[in-house]
Amino acid sequence: MKTLLKVENVKKKFGELVALENINLEVVDKECLGIIGPNGAGKTTLFNVISGYMKPTEGRVEFMGKDITGKRPSELAKLGLVRTFQLIKAFMNMSVEENFRVITDDYKEIMKDFDLWNKRDMIARNLSQGDLRKLNIGLALATNPKLLLLDEPFSGLSPRECAELHSAIDRLKEMEVTMIVIEHKLKELFNHAERVIVLNYGVLLCQGTPEEIVRDIRVIEAYLGDGYAVA
Ligand SMILES: Nc1ncnc2c1ncn2[C@@H]1O[C@H](COP(=O)(O)OP(=O)(O)OP(=O)(O)O)[C@@H](O)[C@H]1O
Ligand SMILES: [Mg+2]
């Protein structure tokens, strides 16, 4: 198995607050890695560091064998490392198709895969939350990434919209896109993630398969609470 991403001894401080404490992790080609943890655990900060939106206070990030620490998001996108945001980013006053055209001319297949072709003339701000999320991920996919970072893709979606997003993520897997997915909705995440890491107060608490994670008492104490059920 080929290592695509390596995070080594990454620390991120905001003043006195330690948002990430000595994080080490690896992502192998074609896997889907889940990241869970309570609010403020440092999940988005870790994405910010990996994707070049923030420089780590200490440590390094390696992508495809190259040191990418401190490189800008635009440089990383060219290398194939792309992320989506917790709050959706798109050109809200432009149509779905125009949004794609900003990135590439080769978008028709992606729009069809994500069920957006019949909505191509709709202005982005008029889309449902689910379609907007699909647009967001579709736009990231249009850059032809090797590694895609998704920050809470299922948040705010109805059950029907969640089902549509599951299909979209299945499509990404078929396309062999490697993914890291931050998600609070564990049931949705565990449909896709083969491996999960748990962050708590900036510390990597544990990692394992979804089954191992829910059984891990430390996770139950820190995050899931008593009586938690994934089913
Ligand atoms: N730009 C910033 N400046 C100062 N503090 C920050 C900044 N970004 C994040 N933090 C702090 O770092 C900690 C980790 O935040 P982060 O957004 O990474 O958490 P998270 O795990 O993504 O939480 P959530 O599940 O709520 O999205 C929090 O205490 C947060 O307040
Ligand atoms: Mg977050």
Image (cartoon, rainbow, N blue to C red):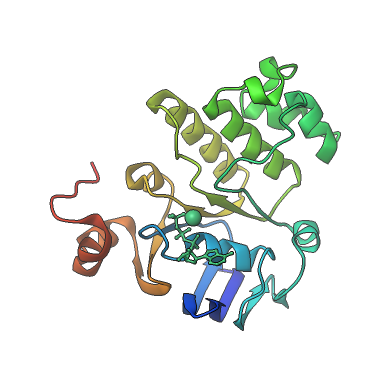
Q: Position of residue 32 (x, y in %)?
A: 49, 54
Residue 91's x, y, as percent? 74, 34
**x 69%, y 43%: residue:** 141
Describe residue 6's horizontal placement relative to residue 201 as left or right.
right
Quadrant location of residue 185? Answer: top left
Q: Is residue 34 above or below residue 222?
A: above
Q: Position of residue 178 (x, y in %)?
A: 59, 55
Residue 159 vertical position relative to residue 186 in the rendered view, above or below: above
Task: Point out the image quarter for the C terminus.
Answer: top left
Is there any visible trace of residue 201 in the rendered image? yes
In this rendering, the answer to whether 118 lies above or below 49 is: above
Q: Nearer the viewer, residue 9 or 53?
A: 53
Q: Position of residue 216 (x, y in %)?
A: 22, 66
**Identity of the residue drawn at 64% across and 20% down:** 126
Quarter of the figure with the N terminus:
bottom right
Residue at the image position 44 percent from the left and 35 percent from the top: 156
Q: Nearer the viewer, residue 77 or 202?
A: 202
Q: Quadrant of residue 226?
A: bottom left
Which residue is farthest right? 105
Q: Does residue 28 appear in the picture of this structure?
A: no
The residue lying toward the viewer, choosing from 226 and 28, is 226
